[in-house]
Amino acid sequence: MTEVDVVVVGAGIVGAACAEALSASGVRVLVLDRGAPAGGTTASGEGNILVSDKEPGPELDLAIASRAEWLAILDRLPERVADVEWEPKGGLVVATGEPALLEDFAAAQRAAGVDARVIKPADAFELEPLLTPAVTVAVHYPEDAQLQPVLAATALLAAVRARGGEVRGGVTALSVRRSAGGRVTGVETDSGVVACGAVVNACGPWAGAFSSLAGAPIEILPRRGMILVTAPLPECVRHKVYDADYVGAVGSGDADLQTSTVVESTRAGTVLIGSSRERIGFDDAVRVKVLRELARKAVGLFPFLGEVPVMRAYGGFRPYAPDHLPVIGADPRVEGLWHATGHEGAGIGLAASTGRLIAELFVGLAPHVDPEPFRVDRPGLLGSVS
């Protein structure tokens, strides 16, 4: 048996951020993942670091803090892994209908501390010359950014290793061992038992299943999203651009298919086109109707895309909590069990502050954001043992 302070189960961006923050605080960490590190939900993300898509409230507060925390993390990463394709490109939200709804949303965000600049259509065309002329109003968000999520998670895990921690891929966590008094003493895996003092459940869409194995179920469900990828192009989309419907889709609990237009370029020259949301369990079948709807709406926002070939499509499952808030903190039912999940499509952006918050609570530091809204035992989140 190997003894460490904390076992983080899940080597995606959130688990990696938790492990990095804990190891930076002097905690001995082991990260386990049943697959390859950063190979699950993180590999199917766009890399968004957004403040533009969240209504005022706890998640926006976490997003604002996390945007700043990402810069602090990048500063302390080893130089050899620090290039995660960080691009502070800014975001542009556009409306093609009644301007008032988007203007009111931006005003509420400004009151919450977001740099949200309402601009006229002519100014939007200066930022994005290829936009549809149907734009009636736009909001520019200079603080929106992007990074490459697999590179970012890999860099975080490299920092953990550099501090003496360990990362093991291809190891499945089967259950949590507890003492007679109920405290976590280890993790049973398909490769043996790892002795530890605490476990962080960072299993993303599979966090609900692992929480049940740990004896403290939480209600986390998968929500599938699809993304189209074009052939490489000369620079044509300068910001992350999406229509005003995106904000409503992010906050919706509707199980039916929802799509909204999100278009952005990558450093490689490809253009990413999203986004879709479906609650269909872990069904990974490709649905042509979803791809067709994404393409149709993207052409409505950027007409030139109608002549651009799509190179591929990919999708992934995002961890969805019924009240749309992440789950971050200790589980009061099992001493030594912690959760960091439920971020849905915002996990990459929120990972930095999630990791910091877990580390602060674990070592007893004052938290940099209020942890209360993200507590595990909030109404409607706790499941029942089947």
Image: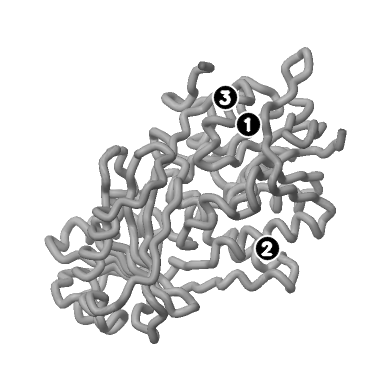
Instruction: Name the residue tied to disc 1.
Output: 330
Q: Nearer the viewer, mark 2 or mark 3?
A: 3
Q: Nearer the viewer, residue 60 or 321?
A: 321
Q: Which residue is at a point 58% across and 47% down the rendered structure image?
A: 354
Q: Is residue 90 visible?
A: yes
Q: Which amino acid type corresponds to the residue marked 2 in the rendered image?
A: Ala
Q: Nearer the viewer, mark 1 or mark 2?
A: 2
- The answer to whether the residue labelled 2 contacts the one labelled 3, judged by CB atoms less than 8 Å apart, is no
Direction from residue 37 to residue 259 in the image, left or right: left
- The answer to whether the residue labelled 1 contacts the one labelled 2, judged by CB atoms less than 8 Å apart, is no
Mark-to-mark CA distance, 2 and 3: 30 Å
Q: Which residue is at a point 31% across and 81% down the rendered structure image?
A: 127
Q: Earlier in the sequence, mark 1 or mark 2?
A: 2
Q: Which mark is residue 212?
A: 3
Q: Nearer the viewer, mark 1 or mark 3?
A: 3
Q: Which amino acid type corresponds to the residue marked 1 in the rendered image?
A: Ala
Mark-to-mark CA distance, 1 and 2: 26 Å
Q: Earlier in the sequence, mark 2 or mark 3?
A: 2
Q: Secondary structure at mark 2?
A: helix
Mark-to-mark CA distance, 1 and 3: 15 Å
Q: Which residue is at a point 33% across and 57% down the rendered structure image?
A: 275
Q: Which mark is residue 155?
A: 2
